[in-house]
Amino acid sequence: MFEIAKQRLQAVFNHIDIDEEVMTRLSVPKRSIIANIPVRMDDGSLRVFPAYRVQYDDTRGPTKGGIRYHPRVNLDEVTSLSFWMTVKCAVAGLPFGGAKGGVTVNPKELSLLEIERLSRGYIRAFADVLGEKRDIPAPDVYTNATIMGWMADEYSMITRRQEPGIITGKPIHLNGSLGRDSATGQGALFTLNEYARHKGWDINQTTIAVQGFGNAGYHFASLAKKQGYRVVAVSDSKGAIFDPKGLNVNDVHQFKLDNNELASVYCDGSVCNMLEFEVMTNEALLELDVDVLALAAMENQITQLNACNIKAKTILEIANGPVTPQADEILEAAGTDVIPDVLANAGGVTVSYFEWVQNRAGYYWEESEVHEKLKKNMTRETNLVFDIAQRYQCSLRTAAYIHGVERLAGAIDQRGNRKLFTRIK
Ligand code: NAD
């Protein structure tokens, strides 16, 4: 996966002149750490969970990146995600490098107390390399604000001081930021709005299908619907629902909370019977004839196997890495625009940055202030990426990578490169 992730850099080097040393620096992570976390289970037994933290590059600032709990987590995946974080923080213009963490675990098999012990164990394992000026974790798949709160608490017990900026995505009452919950979905919507404006779309006539109905997917779908887009389909790991007239996203979300899966929205309950949904597979949702396909689940969802079946002419990557490079080529040839993850989902890390700023200042903002600042950031960076795509006649993904890599290269160069030292000699 990491080798595939790095292929994106090649396209950048084909368009712009970047020092070879930058390429060397960006092709390997700065630091990768593996730990095994012992956890006392509720039944008294002991289990050990493999855990990772990869700090990819810190040239532009302390490293930043979420912690994922998933049975498929491994070093290769965490490294790829840390690489994407490095590019994303640069694309978003944040003073951060990139990192990522993860634990190989199926959190659905653990009790809440076991998850708490595991989360505190993660911090004990990696405390030496974390810190608000070193490396700042955040939530990712199957981790949330509560877990970030436990982690911040564990860190303060180890260091014997309050340092809320050590981690972001915390609960509001534990120094979190207003607006962090919806930030990824909201940021993706700001980017889509700019894209729609450039295309001259009528939002009310624009149909969207959303794969993944978790934190990022739900907030995106709900805000898009509120703004007037027609969200016609959503899916989770158990299935998809479709209504060509448009779904009432908040009702669907409430049903999912009550019943734990979207498929049960199509159920025997009295309210459900009033709603006319078609149930379909996740695969079928990806191939719907909609204007925008928003991918908000996991990596590698569109590959060379299904890329030629995709009918949407615009793909919005809210998840990290949902379209493979091979699929990218097929989609580009078919004239499909992919609004890339390193831009489209940067709203999450942007509001994490705002949370870190507020923690360090000890001064907290109104939600409207967070919203306005996020809008300004996302709109500015989105337009810069669109300008680059226009200038180089390249895909939006290559444009976003050019934008991020130029900033990274600037920072790496300014710290002193071969040319500088040759001149001195
Ligand atoms: P989440 O765990 O809250 O939600 C994931 C959703 O995807 C769940 O509804 C799950 O059922 C669904 N899903 C899993 N496999 C699926 C499949 N094959 N088909 C359809 N649905 C499937 O996670 P999240 O925080 O919303 O993150 C989703 C993606 O967005 C991840 O790639 C994550 O790295 C990325 N992301 C999230 C944030 C954030 O702030 N939450 C920020 C940046 C990027």
Image (cartoon, rainbow, N blue to C red):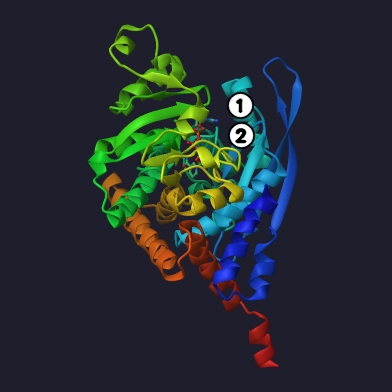
Q: Is residue 168 left or right of residue 387?
A: right
Q: Are marks 1 and 2 in contact (CB under 8 Å)?
A: yes
Q: Which mark is residue 107?
A: 1
Relative height, residue 73 to residue 202 (above, below): above
For label 2, being within 8 Å of ligand 1 is answered no
**Disc marking residue 259:** none
Nearer to us in this view, 9 or 93: 9
Q: Quadrant of residue 103?
A: top right
Q: Which structural element holds mark 2?
A: strand
Residue 169, horizontal then vertical, whole percent: 47, 42
Question: Alpha-carbon distance for marks 1 and 2?
Answer: 7 Å
Vertical side of 148 occupied by 274: above or below: above
For badge 1, the amino acid type reads: Pro
Instruction: State the quadrant of the C terminus.
Output: bottom right
Instruction: Pick whichever, 275 or 333, lies toward us.
Output: 333
Residue 275 visible to an observer of this rendering:
yes
Residue 82 picture location, percent across and down: 61, 51
Write down the quadrant of residue 105 in the picture.
top right
The answer to whether 177 is drawn above or below residue 15 in the figure is above
Q: Nearer the viewer, residue 209 or 259?
A: 209
Q: Which numbered disc, 1 or 2, marks the residue that appears first in the sequence?
A: 2
Give the residue number, with chain letter if any, for mark 2.
69
- Badge 1 density bin: few <14, some 14–19, many ≥20, Cα 10 Å: some
At label 2, the amino acid type is Tyr
Residue 180 seen from this side: no
User: Horizontal and vertical percent for residue 307?
Assistant: 54, 42
**Left or right: 372 in relation to 68:** left
Mark 1 Cβ and ligand 1 under 8 Å apart? no
Residue 29: x percent and y percent?
A: 68, 58
Residue sitting nearer the eye, 19 or 94: 19
